[in-house]
Image (spheres, rainbow, N blue to C red):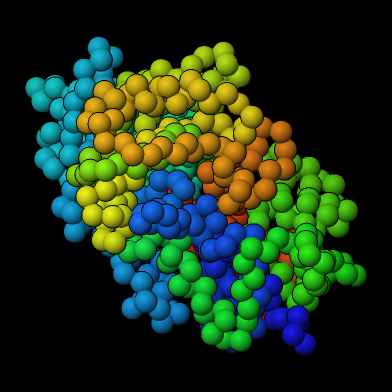
Amino acid sequence: MENNYDAIVVGAGPGGVTVASLLANSGKRVLLADKNPKCGGRMMTVVKDGFHYELFPINCVPQHNSLYEKLSGILGKDKDVTLILGDEFGYIGDLYFEDGKGVVRKWRLGASPIKMITTLGIRLYNIPALLGVFMALKKFATMPKSEYSKLYQISARDYFDSVAKVPEGLRTYFLATFAEGVFEMTSDKVPASEMIKAFQVTVKGSGGRYYEGGIGHFFDVMSTTVEENGGMKLMNTRVKSIDIENGKAAGITTESGEKFTAPLVISDAGIRQTAIKLAGEEHFEKPYIDRLKKLENNLACVGFRYFTDAPVLDVPMAVYYPAGCVGTWQEFEDMQNGKTKPKHNYIYLGTTSLYKNMAPAGKQVIYAVMSCTPDTKQDLTPYLEYIEARTRKLCPKLYDHIERTEIMTPGSVVGVGNDMMFEGQGGESYGTAISVGQAGPDRPSAKSPVEGLYYVGNDVEGSGLGTHLAVESGFKVFEIVTEAK
């Protein structure tokens, strides 16, 4: 009886913790197993030398009324985590726009809209351009779901260019933000529907939400619901297989050989990793496996974590948009293959050290990153050189205060996130991409063809910005399996 559970959840990322804690809260005896020492997956909180930080940069959206608050409220743990809102800082970030002549202008997000317009290179006397900007933003902000839900088969880039005749500066900002910035995917791949929904969520709920102790700490706290309701957390535990008996999910076997049984197994290990590696593709029909193998990955993250001996950034986020940074997937593949080098790419600078109790007094950990393909074997030298050169231009004083540097690579994702399955894959920031053909109604289902086996997390149904998508998936899977019973 010790090893017998009502449900087993493989993986303690945001989606896995959400569904495991909701099931436990509903009275189910749950086993939550993860290869990492802490919850959070890629967003696991690292505690080192007095710093609390994630391995990868994060800016939680929406700021207000998020599913995180819904989850902590349902579990009765809203007083066990401390929410930090970007509003508390007045300004959550800076926007840097570099025009084609190399001139860099800066706008503090939330400040004068007029300043934003001029920062993006739009002349105030250019009435047609200003009117185009106003009409485009109004159209996207007010478009009803019944209309934008018809736009899953057209890319954000193609749709934007077909309906919005605006100056290049606004086009650069909008497409870079609501494609690559939000979904870690190029705008020629992200569906127009997701771009518009993300814009509306941001306009309505703003951004800049965080938690004292880190995002991973939030999920560590939520996961205590499992043990409080008679279940168990198995951290530092790799799952060798999801066991299938008579065509049904029956439990798991760990790499140490220990077996645990349950009629319900939910995997946050990635849809392809679950079906092909953990369960075994022999339990699925060939067309299903073929489709999983063809799923597109999103982009990865490469760059630096700089640990400084003095405060450098005075806002949590600074984003650099050079003219021409609305890249296509082919352009990223060309960089991966060494055909081209980064020369006008979007860069994210940020710190969580401004938040309370996240860093030693007077010190910061600063992220300086850009996107790349998820290939773990590519040469990252050109990316790192590009990031450093641009960061020195934007924030030269940073390099007078660096005590220590850590490098972020696609390869480092595999250690905390989903295991690598195929060549050229493994380092993706989230998992399968939000792209045309695999978003909205085309997103893979959380219910697998094997009875009792479900997927949760970024790879399956749901939408949202970053980890919010995974949490939404956790809620959806909880509803699905509860209704199924």
Q: Is residue 32 at least partly visible in the picture?
A: yes
Please give left or right for residue 476 compared with residue 80 in the image.
Answer: right
Q: Is residue 361 above or below residue 76?
A: above
Front residue of this view, candidates 153 and 58:
58
Residue 147: x and y in percent read 43, 48
Q: Residue at x 54, y 20 (%)?
A: 335
Seen from this angle, which residue lies furthest left?
125
Front residue of this view, candidates 145 and 327:
327
* Quadrant location of the N terminus in the rendered image: bottom right
Question: Splitting the image into 4 quarters, where does residue 181 fall?
Answer: top left
Residue 176: x and y in percent read 38, 33
Question: Splitting the image into 4 quarters, where does residue 205 fall?
Answer: bottom left
Q: Is residue 109 above or below residue 73?
A: above
Q: Residue at x 29, y 25 (%)?
A: 392
Q: Is residue 301 at least partly visible in the picture?
A: no
Please give left or right for residue 382 compared with residue 27 in the image.
Answer: left
Question: Splitting the image into 4 quarters, where does residue 343 fall?
Answer: top left
Q: Residue at x 28, y 55 (%)?
A: 360
Residue 334: x and y in percent read 56, 19
Please give left or right for residue 164 compared with residue 109 in the image.
Answer: right
